[in-house]
Structure formats: structure tokens, C-alpha cells
Amino acid sequence: MEKTIIVIPARYASTRLAAKPLAMIHGRPMIQWVYEQAKKARGIDQVIVATDDARIEQVVRNFGGECQMTSPELASGTDRVAAVADQVSAEIYVNLQGDEPLIDPKAIENAVELVRSKRFALSTVMVPLRTREELSDPSVVKVIVDSNDRAIYFSRLPIPYSRGPLPEPGEELFCKRHVGLYVYSKSALMKFRNLPVSRLEKAEVLEQLRALENGMSMGVAEANFVSVGVDTPEDLEKVRQLLV
């Protein structure tokens, strides 16, 4: 089986929630929750936290996790994953955002399988949108896919546009909620790393659009769990309630 590594990028600085990876959730830092969920995924050879901060490194090592220091000059999580790939050889790399403490290990496995099976060189995950508020919330990224599980577009706005009213609660939506996880073959990761920031990426502030705008097909694995990417104190409190 191809060697597969999960890399969890974790920066100390955050504009909306200071020291986000170290935020405590029922006695454990958020980065530990993410790390432990990643370790539960089958078919994974190694889990590494990639950080630019010694405080995060120390916390990770204290709970027994593996950590690698990366340059603070790196612009994105993908760049941090690629920096780990320069040092740790594998065929498949998973970029798992350090603010996804509710990530389902099965979702990781399904996204990896899209790449391992050679259907795609790049993949991600989507889950159902559960409220009308999520549909209209720009912090909740939406994705639509084609009939072959390929991403068509990602947006912070509801997609596709409809002339009619928004769906009522309980009605199925065309778009799904995007989860902050990416799987790359090594060649796809290196190609993505060398692409310039794209126009759509700048417009939506979504780096995955760089891949689509440059003709890279991205598979999307569907999962069904409550995803909360922690960006604000309110998100953090919501996660604490869900993990009671």
C-alpha cells in the first residue's frame, strides 16, 4: 500500500481567535483533538503537526504527538504540507486543518481512497448543510460537484444561484458544506505548490480554487458528520457543546 501521511498545519497567529490550536476543549488543546481523530483513520502511516511556533511544538510533544517545525514565511497550509513532504517521503499526503476537532476518521479514509484508487490526484470532503443560516454564512464554504464526484466550484455564497426562494428547512440543497481537508498525490502537491495565486482564489479567499482554475480535477468524498471549523470564540463554544 502507498505510504500515506497526514499533516496538520497549525499556526499560532489567528486574526479571529488567538492561539487557536492551543484553545482548550474539555481539558485538551484543540490540536490534540484533531491529532487523535487523525490517528483513528485506517491506512495512515504517520501523523505530523506542522507548525511555525515553539509553543505549539511543545504542546504536541507533551501529549506524545509528532511535530515538525516549518518556516513562518510559508503562506498557506498547503505550503506547510509541501515543506513536510520535502523532508518526509510518501506517495500520498493529507492536509488536515488544525481547526477541525470534529473530523470523522472515516471521512479521511474515503477522501484518501479517491486518490489511492487513482480516480483523482487531489480530493477533499463535503457534508450536508444543516441550516438555512449555514447556506448564507460566508464563513461556511460551499461546494457543488458533478455526477462523477468532481468538484465544479467552491464559494462563500450559496451556489448555484436560484431565482426562487431559498429552500425550506429539511429540503435538500444543491450545494454541500466543504470540510477543511485535502488529499494529494505527491506529484499533485508539488504541482499545486508551484502554481501562482489565482484570480478566483483571491476573490473568494479559497486556495482550492487555484487547483480548479489551473485545470486540476478534485474529487469530493461525501460524509455525514457535524463539521465545525473553529475560527471564532463562538465556533469554539459550539464545539465544546457538541463534545460534551
Image (cartoon, rainbow, N blue to C red):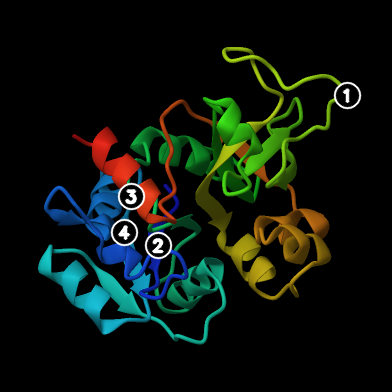
At x 39%, y 64%, the residue is: 17
Disc 4 is placed on an element classified as strand
Mark 2 = which residue? 7
Mark 4 = which residue? 47
The disc placed on residue 236 is: 3
Quadrant in which residue 222 is drawn: top right
At x 49%, y 43%, the residue is: 112
In the rendered structure, which disc, 3 or 1, sits on the residue that comes first in sequence?
1
In this rendering, is residue 26 above or below 13?
Answer: above
Left or right: 176 with respect to 19? right
In this rendering, is residue 126 above or below 163?
Answer: below
Three-letter code, disc 2:
Val
In the rendered structure, which disc, 1 or 2, sits on the residue that comes first in sequence?
2
In the rendered view of the protein, which quadrant contains the C terminus?
top left
Three-letter code, disc 4:
Val
Q: Give the class, few, some or many, for how many residues have Cα within 10 Å of label 3's Cα (few <14, many ≥20).
A: many
Disc 3 is placed on an element classified as helix
Left or right: 178 with respect to 150? left
Specify whether residue 119 is in view.
Answer: no
The disc placed on residue 177 is: none
User: How far, Cα to Cα, is label 3 from label 2?
Assistant: 22 Å
Three-letter code, disc 1:
Arg
Q: Give the class, few, some or many, for how many residues have Cα within 10 Å of label 1's Cα (few <14, many ≥20).
A: few
